[in-house]
Amino acid sequence: MTIKIGIVGYGNLGKGVETELKLNPDMELLGIFSRRNPAQVASESAVYHLDDIQQFKDKIDVLVLCGGSRSDIPEQAPELQKDFTTVNSYDNHGEIPAHFDSINEVALANNNVGVIATGWDPGLFSLNRLVAEAVLPNGNTYTFWGKGVSQGHSDAIRRVDGVKMGVQYTIPNDELISQIKDGKDVSYTKTSSHKRVCYVVADEGADQEAITQSISTMKDYFEGYETEVHFIDEAEFKQQHTGMPHGGRVIRRGYTDDENMAVYEFNLELESNPQFTAAAAIAYARAAHRLDKEGNYGAKSVFDIAPAYLSPKSGEELRRELL
Amino acid sequence: MTIKIGIVGYGNLGKGVETELKLNPDMELLGIFSRRNPAQVASESAVYHLDDIQQFKDKIDVLVLCGGSRSDIPEQAPELQKDFTTVNSYDNHGEIPAHFDSINEVALANNNVGVIATGWDPGLFSLNRLVAEAVLPNGNTYTFWGKGVSQGHSDAIRRVDGVKMGVQYTIPNDELISQIKDGKDVSYTKTSSHKRVCYVVADEGADQEAITQSISTMKDYFEGYETEVHFIDEAEFKQQHTGMPHGGRVIRRGYTDDENMAVYEFNLELESNPQFTAAAAIAYARAAHRLDKEGNYGAKSVFDIAPAYLSPKSGEELRRELL
């Protein structure tokens, strides 16, 4: 029997889940639930209005919540958790502990499972930060992001006066990465660890110098970072800069005694950030369904789930093929 | 209360566990158990004869089995499992499924836990092979080992006539690794993926050409591989080639749709292979103790253990600091 999946929200992530489900024959997409008029949602899958989701209470095994972390997930997740086992990719790191607690309460009260903060960061990066620290207690962990498109920073530059189109790439400091792996003393700060490279299509007649100045000095986003602003034309933008690549790495440099260094590194290079995030959410949806069937209710994070639950293979197959 | 640990076997791995335990304040070494006369085992820790281990049945929480995989573990593990929760680093991949079953039977009959095949391969590499495949079902996984010392191959060259000292480094094929990550078609075979580099101190008057010939054509070990044999003098050998570095990487190249590639990579660079293997076994010993306290008995592998169990931190701390 296939695992019946519902998708809530049909932005980049929701579309990613729809795409990735086709690669997982043990799963079946029952429907996409949107706040928009279903007739206006362009998908080959069944689309329903989110208001009608209650009717699917007994038909759906796991809901994958694909709304945004800023307002959608905090609002929708606790409400939907009452009737469904859910998985989300909530990525507001500072609010994750409170989000876990709120989902845990509803999930325990309603005998279902809520897996929060899947994806890659939070998600697989978190998993590696934990394993690395547990195995190498004497050491330091460094997380680097990119090369990749930061949605938040791209949105920010598009709000600058005179900017018609814009995208921001986060670029990790490769020299710092080499120094860490070579065992050198490093000063890893938020601003020294990454550089920010922007490609901008300016409005006709706009003051490019003023745009560069506005971007480079933008608080919380660019100030303090090494920032490059490149002006290009619309044709180049559309050809080169509409993808959503991302990735990054978690490095822990530890010492197993006074002399011996150990470098633990986890690295992702993704041509499509939303598709990979979706793919991770799907693996955790499989786990959520198993936990639910076992009656192991409540909120869970990637920390609480045995890896075997992510795979469609049996324990015997896994030991034979992958151990 | 600290977790009370016993070490069985005092070779490189047992010494590694003794060293790494000092980095884990939630654990305490109760004693080393050896088949040798305890008076002749040079350690600052308490050493007992393995025959006396029964007396520690109620004092030790977890035994870390550090004997060899060829004969020690298959013999000792099922026997010791009767009285103890155990962790081992059994690394005979082909025999792991049967080993799991034999430990599972004894552990279930005696209400304890046996975590098998910890370390890095099997162990953390296996974990990553599983997660990578679950998240990227459309793809291929490649494992590379090295640069590092292969104990088995070093033993093999030391058995060649005229060889006084010898060490073998396994070197991964970096070009093949680049091709995989660049999305190129590759032919990954056992022999194309690694090269074998040997450093040999020859007996005085020995025929170096004959030694090179014997090594390069040795079945199961070198035949078919690109093999280099370098002759050096004893002083250089002692200075440069007595360490036990190792490492390697697991790469999965997957496709999240017809166009978008995703590269998942896990990479270890270890200056001391036995110390890192010991460090991983210790994290799994912590997990074994928790499973035991929960009454979750039986054999387990890295696939069956939720990552949170590896860390001394609480779920709340982990979510706040690492998620």
Image (spheres, coloured by chain):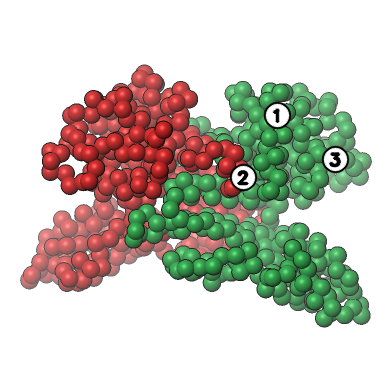
Chain colours: A red, B green
Question: How crowded is the residue under tag 3: few (<14 C-alpha within 10 Å), some, or many (20+)?
Answer: many
Residue bearing the label numbered 1: B105
Residue A268, relative to residue B38: is it above or below? below
Query: Amino acid under label 1?
Result: Glu
Q: Nearer the viewer, residue B22 or B312?
A: B312
Mark 1 and mark 2: Cα distance apart in space: 18 Å
Residue B266, relative to residue A200: is it above or below? above
Do dots 1 and 2 share one subunit?
no
Going from the N terminus, do you reach mark 3 or mark 1 first? 3
Which residue lies at the image location 73% right of the left edge and 68% below the top edge? B222
**Chain letter, disc 1 residue:** B
Mark 2: secondary structure:
helix
Which residue lies at the image location 59% right of the left edge and 61% below the top edge? B144
Query: Amino acid under label 3?
Result: Ser
Residue bearing the label numbered 2: A320
Residue B220, numbered circle: none
Q: Position of residue A71 (x, y in %)?
A: 23, 37
Query: Amino acid under label 2?
Result: Arg
Question: How crowded is the residue under tag 2: few (<14 C-alpha within 10 Å), some, or many (20+)?
Answer: some
| Mark toward the viewer: 3 or 2 | 2
**Chain letter, disc 2 residue:** A
Residue A72, relative to residue A151: is it above or below? above
Q: Quadrant of the N terminus of chain A?
A: top left
Q: Position of residue B7 (x, y in %)?
A: 77, 38
Q: Residue B309: which quarter of the image?
A: top right
Q: Nearer the viewer, residue B316 or B145?
A: B145
